[in-house]
Image (cartoon, coloured by chain):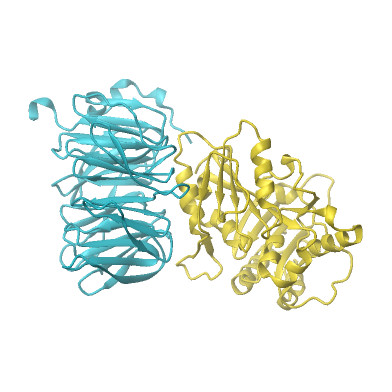
Amino acid sequence: MKADTSQFPELDKTKFEQRGTEFKLGIPITNAVTVGNSIAVGFGDGTVRIFTSGESSEPIKAHKGIVLCMSKDGDNILTGGDDGRFLNISLDGKISEIGNFGTRWVDHVTANNGSLVCSSGNIVYLWSPNHKEPKLFEHNSTIGGIAFDAKGRRLAVSRYGGVTLWKKDYSNKWNSSELNWKGSHNKVIFSPDGKYLVTSMQENQLHFWRLKDKIDSAMSGYGAKIKSFAFVDDSKYLATSGAKEAVCWPFDGEGPVGREPICLPYVGNKLVTFVEPFPNENAILTGLSDGSVFLSEIEKASNTIIIRGFTEFEVSAIAVTKDCSHLLIGDMGGNILWTSIWDEEKK
Amino acid sequence: MEETNKQVPVTVLTGFLGAGKTTLLNRILTEQHGKKYAVIVNEFGEQGIDNDLVVDADEEVFEMNNGCICCTVRGDLIRILSGLMKRADKLDAIIVETTGLADPAPVAQTFFVDQDVADRTKLDAIVTVADAVHLSTQLTDHHEAEEQIAFADVVLLNKIDLVDESGLEVVKERIKKINPFAKIINTTKCGVSLNEILNLDAFSLKRVLDVEPDFLTSDHDHEHDDDVTSLSFVSDTPLDMEKFQDWFSKLLQTKGQDILRTKGILDFTGESDRYVFQGVHMLMDASPMGKWPQGKERSSRLVFIGRNLESMNLKEGFENCKSA
């Protein structure tokens, strides 16, 4: 069923939609990443656009087909594409190629302290600062996700059958250990405090390991695959998509085992497709399958406000600038909302 | 749920190495002018592939974590199909070329199991390219060859110029014994009209109603127990829905590994609609498909393709489902 948008007059726009700029680009938005006070957005036609307050954003032709993944390295943007290229893009739009894998996709990219990492197929490639040739980490299956811990000494690589945890010793040698759990693991993240590792799976569930004692457990009960999840307020909660509510698991104290998650409901009964922590707050921005986006305080669901109304397309990207002055929302229909967060007088 | 017309059709090309998959692929790509295709290849053949958009992948069969032993999917397809659906320009079709030793079941199951894949793409058909000269030997020596025939919607019997007429008949009978549904097309150098292999919608329930299985009338002779064969049952007596569901679900749960494909049209007592289903191992797509056509006899038809079918007491089980 489609909603008839013509019934809703302009007045129905949220204050953020009124204040901000809406772009109807018609190209699916695949990623958004915060780079200082700018936000870089990747698209399904291989372009990247950079949004900065007071500046226009022109498309940068980065990849041939799709920007599959994005990350950042300091003030630079990292992208991987279906053209097999791993790119470094500066905020002024200069592109340099870090690696090229031909007909094999670059599925994941990340960086830490100048070390640049991507995965293509079952291999992780790591370029240390000032090294021309990458170091290769091979795995038993195509890689589902990669993540550094905050210090950059541990690199988690999710795969079929679990996670391979690479640890750098003090002679800068990488040693691996395996965290196994049956099934195919996709995205992987560390908790900001480094105590937990969480993956989403091909099944509609998440899996986590407590790293100090390798205790692990599933977080299940979802109606759909969990495409988006993130730690909020340092490591207090893990906010997750994949249900009609934003499901927030407690990770303080002894973690989520035996505890109930907080479930934040939204009007419209739609699937949550994207969650993004609001910086420095115990709050999340939640994007739904109809394009609407809300800001909620996790422990005070009544303090939920609507940021963007529906567009009919699932929210695929949300990012907030480092200074918390602006936010950007993107969806699979190619609609972007770029807006300041605060009223001018409240600044 | 996405509307059906937004789903991009996916054609799967299987067949042993050297049968002519890449020849067929290049034929499709050169003859379909002005269409945008993505091609997913899992092994580099000797011939190049003439297309802008070629994705290179490794076949990865993943077991799901749900305890169902035959519920395997193809991880590479989930990853690549989900990625392709983010493209700005819409694809007319996606063609997957499997390796010679690929099992088609996980490919088909991927379209049942993964919701994102099922929402945005649909399995159009499994097209198996078979070498008329070597197929008989391959069927004897390799389970995979049997499975590729068992899952085929179309068998392109290629290189027929290299066998005599009686040899051709032997191969065709062998194919029909394994899979009475497959449409067999004789070709040399994969010369086939593309509308016979593309946009077939072979996995839709509607198509189950259209396809008349082509059963051999000859006796089943000296099969080995693990040969893939087919059995079919017809009943003019309406079936009891509860009894049928009970028998059929137990059957799939316990024998699902040996049952490769099932299709059926069912006449249940007290129901005015025809029930149609089709399945791959334990996974099933079923739905009422409207009233029985006027002037036509109502009857139930059920077809199994699999191994060790004789040991499953299928006839007895089916008979017991008839309404008293």
**Which residue is found at the position 48% from the left and 52% from the top?**
B115
Can residue A49 be seen in this snapshot? yes
Q: Is residue A207 left or right of residue B288?
A: left
Q: Quadrant of the C terminus of chain A?
A: top left
The number of callouts visible is: 0
Q: Residue at x 32, y 50 (%)?
A: A109
Indicate the quadrant where residue A60 lies.
top left
Across and down, in percent, residue A310 comes to 36, 33
Residue at the extreme right: B166
Tell me, what hue is chain B?
Answer: yellow
Q: Is residue A168 above or below residue A79?
A: below
* Residue B192 picture location, percent across and down: 76, 43
**Which chain is painted in cyan?**
A
Residue nearest the viewer, comparing B241 with B192: B192
Which image quadrant for residue A134?
bottom left
Judge from the rendering whether residue A223 lies leftward or rightward of residue A293; answer left or right.
right
- What is the x, y in percent for residue A273? 36, 46
Q: Is residue B13 above or below residue B87?
A: below
Say above or below: A340 vs A169.
above
Question: Which x, y percent locates residue A13?
Answer: 29, 26
Q: Quadrant of residue A213?
A: bottom left
Q: Residue at x 17, y 33 (%)?
A: A341
Q: Is residue B57 left or right of residue A250?
A: right
Task: Name the residue nearer the viewer: A14 or B63.
Answer: B63
Q: Is residue A260 visible?
A: no
